[in-house]
Amino acid sequence: MTMETHELLSRIELFKGLDPGELAAIAQVAHRRSVERGTVIFEAGDEASDVFVLASGKVKIVTLSPEGKELILATLGAGQVFGEMALIESAPRSASAIADTAAELVGINRSDFQRLLENHPGISLKLLQILSGRLRRANSRMQSLAYMDVAGRLARYFLDLAREHGQRLGNGWIVVRRPTHADIAHSIGTSRETVSRLINEFETETGLVNKGRFTYIREELLD
């Protein structure tokens, strides 16, 4: 298991550049965990004890609006890191993490993670780059919620989904596994019924084609 963890960490952007001995040392203190879809990994307000690397599957980061409605802040895929903010701030979790599919996690506890940042400035720099990217995406999302109508927000959602999780096909299309209409609605601040109606309209008016749980997007739309 340690060797498998070592190999996994070597493929994660955050840890690229570490030598085999350093990766092995991290693997020795890391712990693996498999979770089923719907598992709550941590909740907002929990004490933060670990940072997580997503080995496989997807995890959604969610919070609740003042009205009690779920808002999906991000959906993360394999190789991405989450839960680090609370460790850096020494603060409670600001949002909840829920497995969106069956997933495998690699956890690193607070003291080991902080020692890692102190001993390897390159990792700290990569972490700053990750956090900066998340901040840009959050700002973009706030702008879309403030200035775009629902159709515009849905179009932006699909384009971001394709950029972050899409797989290119050889015929000029990008395919993504589409979240449920309810999850999309929670991400863009509307109702499931509105999402369903707009997706049907998009099929006839834009470069989107839906087949089952997959959406095909013309590659030229990402330019």
Image: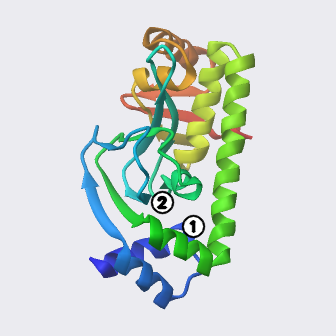
Looking at the picture, does residue 205 appear above or below residue 84? above
Element on which disc 1 rests: helix
- Mark drawn on residue 79: 2
Tell me the CA gap for discs 2 and 1.
7 Å
Q: Could you tell whether 71 is left or right of 143 in the image? A: left
Q: Residue at x 43, y 26 (%)?
A: 183
Specify the amino acid type for callout 1. Answer: Glu
Residue 138, position as x, y percentages in the image: 66, 37
**Disc 1 designates what residue?**
13
Looking at the image, residue 57 sits to the left or right of residue 191; the answer is: left
How far across and how far down the image is residue 66, in percent? 51, 17
Q: Position of residue 171 (x, y in %)?
A: 57, 45
Element at badge 2? loop
Mark 2 or mark 1: whose residue is earlier in sequence: 1
Q: Residue 67 carries which label?
A: none
* 72 and 182: which is toward the camera: 72
The residue lying at 46 percent from left, 73 percent from top is: 112
Q: What residue type is labelled 2?
A: Gly
